[in-house]
Amino acid sequence: MGVAALLVTVMAVRRDRVSAGEAMAFRAVNGLPDSVYPPAWAVMQLGAFGAAPAAAAVAWLAGDGVLARQLLAGGTGTWALAKLVKQLVRRPRPAVLLPGTRGRGRDAAGLGYLSGHAGVAAALGAAALPRLGPIGRALTAIPAVGVTRVYVGAHLPLDIAGGAALGFTVEAAVDLVKERTRHAAQ
């Protein structure tokens, strides 16, 4: 499912333009008031590269070494693959494609498609979700990280969808390897 979603978003993005629907969705989020920035910045960090080792450390300290390895592999693997996909697709950041984009915080560097933050958040969330209770599941930041990246002007909606699809795909692969390794050891 993640691979199919990734392929659909790759086929939908264009290097030189943004569809009317994607532009409308982008402007609705990017146009929110500046007062949203402080909490948005905090949420956005849950998809940064450092979130993977931080989440792995928390799992390890909680005594769950299996989850710690899964978080580290899924989060860092997604981050690395996102860098590769960006070079293949080469879609610019929103400010290049949409005049009037509101940037908040430090300007995002490099290419736009796909969002590494959304990917890392998806991979980490997918790994942790089965171990969370109902309250933890309700509080997951998977979609919020992507929305914050649109809010700060770093990504367009298809960049977020592609990043999330990559994160879910990488996490599924990590989980598959974990299960095959566990069965082979028995």
Image (cartoon, rainbow, N blue to C red):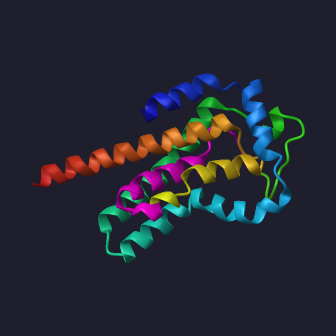
Q: Residue at x 14, y 49 (%)?
A: 184
Question: Which residue lies at the image location 71% right of the left edge and 60% below the top edge?
Answer: 40
Outermost residue to the bottom: 61
The percent position of residue 30, horizontal first and vertical second, equals 79, 46
- Give yes or no for residue 6 being in the magenta stretch: no
> In the rendered view, does 84 fall on the left or right side of 91?
left
Give whichever of 141, 3 is nearer the camera: 141
Which image quadrant for residue 172?
top left
Q: Compared with residue 49, is residue 110 higher up or lower down, i.e. above or below?
A: above
What count of labels does the image hold?
0
Q: Is residue 133 magenta?
A: yes
Q: Position of residue 174 (x, y in %)?
A: 35, 48
Quadrant for the N terminus in the image: top left
Q: Quadrant of the C terminus?
A: bottom left
The residues colored magenta run 110-136
Q: Residue at x 60, y 58 (%)?
A: 48
Image side of residue 48 versus residue 55, left or right? right
Horizontal and vertical percent for residue 127?
Answer: 40, 54
Name which residue lies at 58% across and 43% down.
83
